[in-house]
Amino acid sequence: MQLKLYTCDVLYSGMGTPRNNGAIVVSEELIVATGTPDELKQMYPQAVFAGHHRVIAPEPANAHTHLDLSAMPYTEKPYTEWIGEVIAFSRTGKRNLESALQGLTQTARKVGDIVTEENVMEALLQHESAQGIAYWEVIGVNPEHADPIFQATVERLRRWRKLERPGGMKVGLSPHTPHTVSGKLLKMLCEFADAEGFPMQIHVAEHPSELEFHTSGTGDLARAVEGWSGQKTTDILGHANGPTIVEHLHLLGVLKTRPTLIHVVNVHESDIRLIAEAGCPVVTCPRSNQALDCGVFNWPAFAQHGVEIGMGTDSTGSGKTLNILDEIQFASTLYGEEVPLRSLVRAAVKGNYRVLGLNVPFLRRGEPVSNLQFWSF
Ligand SMILES: [Zn+2]
């Protein structure tokens, strides 16, 4: 039996923390051992050196994307202006099933996707190889419309749940953001999803203008939302301006339903503490944050508070590609020494699998070789 030895900069077995300077010995079909190159060379002198890789780990996942925007050209613009581009793009009719299926071929097999069309939801739930969660996006700023929107959402989610297949994608819910979903509707949706076990993602504190919207009711975003909806920020929120976005979620009782929070760039230390206490995982999309002039996710602070961090590409419109390895490479350059590659690898595997409700395959003696992937970037 021919044994092969591979070495790598980072090895992640799916257990504990990833290690630097790792190695793995495999037979044709099974993993034989993991360790350091020296240890394994000594234990398996007959193993033939078969190559060095940047990372050896289980398959990475993409925890947050918008596959139906896969035909949207990459656009660098401040958040509020960029949203205008998305609305204009959606009017072209190209935000559709074809784009979503095209996007699916360009991203990880395990994916968290925000869905806006019924036929996309049905196609993802019936897809043969995709895994993860398809989150139905809900928008509704006017609290007077909360009840009918809530009823329609409940009906849809229960209907789609019947289409779930073993090993396939699951139905989730994405109340879009705390500034595009009234406080009243947000609370109803999150309590329902929590009670019936639908996983959630909410975009939170992506751009500085969102924080202004909440705390003072001023700024570009507040003006834009009031312009298209006719709703004052205080009507949407259901209380006076003042609390931060995360405090708003806490006051509504949303945090305790443990949604996954996407972006969380414009937050204070006290917000991070609230998120950590509630046990909500977060997902960061560093390339998108840069394209939309949002600022930089405070990875070290979230890690220090013990928050589970995942990573996503967002759409091609703001993330450029749907390849999670491109996101890791960008993050590695962005954070440098502050966030070691080991942490980025853990986020793309352990963090993302947790968000998507999947079990991480282990790289250990006796497990199939198919559990491991070589990551190159
Ligand atoms: Zn997004």
Image (spheres, grey):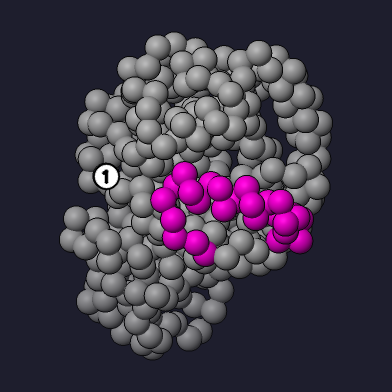
Q: Quadrant of the C terminus?
A: bottom left
Q: Residue at x 36, y 67 (%)?
A: 329
Q: Badge 1 local density, few (<14 within 10 Å), some, or many (20+)?
A: some
Is residue 169 rendered to the left or right of residue 285?
right
Question: Is residue 348 depicted above or below 125 in this figure?
Answer: below
Residue 52 within the segment the image draws in magenta: no
Asked which quadrant contains residue 140, the reply is top right
Our reading of the magenta stretch's main secondary structure is helix
Percent x, y of residue 67: 63, 55
Looking at the image, which is closer to me, 111 or 25?
111
Question: Is residue 143 depicted above or below 159 in this figure?
Answer: above
Q: Amino acid at mark 1?
A: Asn
Is residue 145 rendered to the left or right of residue 260?
right
Asked which quadrant contains residue 159, the reply is top right
Is residue 7 rendered to the left or right of residue 190?
left
Percent x, y of residue 210: 40, 34
Question: Is residue 18 depicted above or below 9 in this figure?
Answer: above
Ligand 1 within 8 Å of the CB at mark 1: no
Q: Residue at x 54, y 79 (%)?
A: 28
Q: Is residue 24 visible?
A: no
Percent x, y of residue 358: 56, 45
Question: Tag 1, which secondary structure?
Answer: loop
Q: Residue at x 76, y 34 (%)?
A: 161
Residue to which mark 1 is pinned: 298
Q: Residue at x 56, y 35 (%)?
A: 176
Question: Is residue 82 depicted above or below 172 in this figure?
Answer: below
**Residue bounds of the magenta highlight:** 74-99
Percent x, y of residue 208: 34, 39
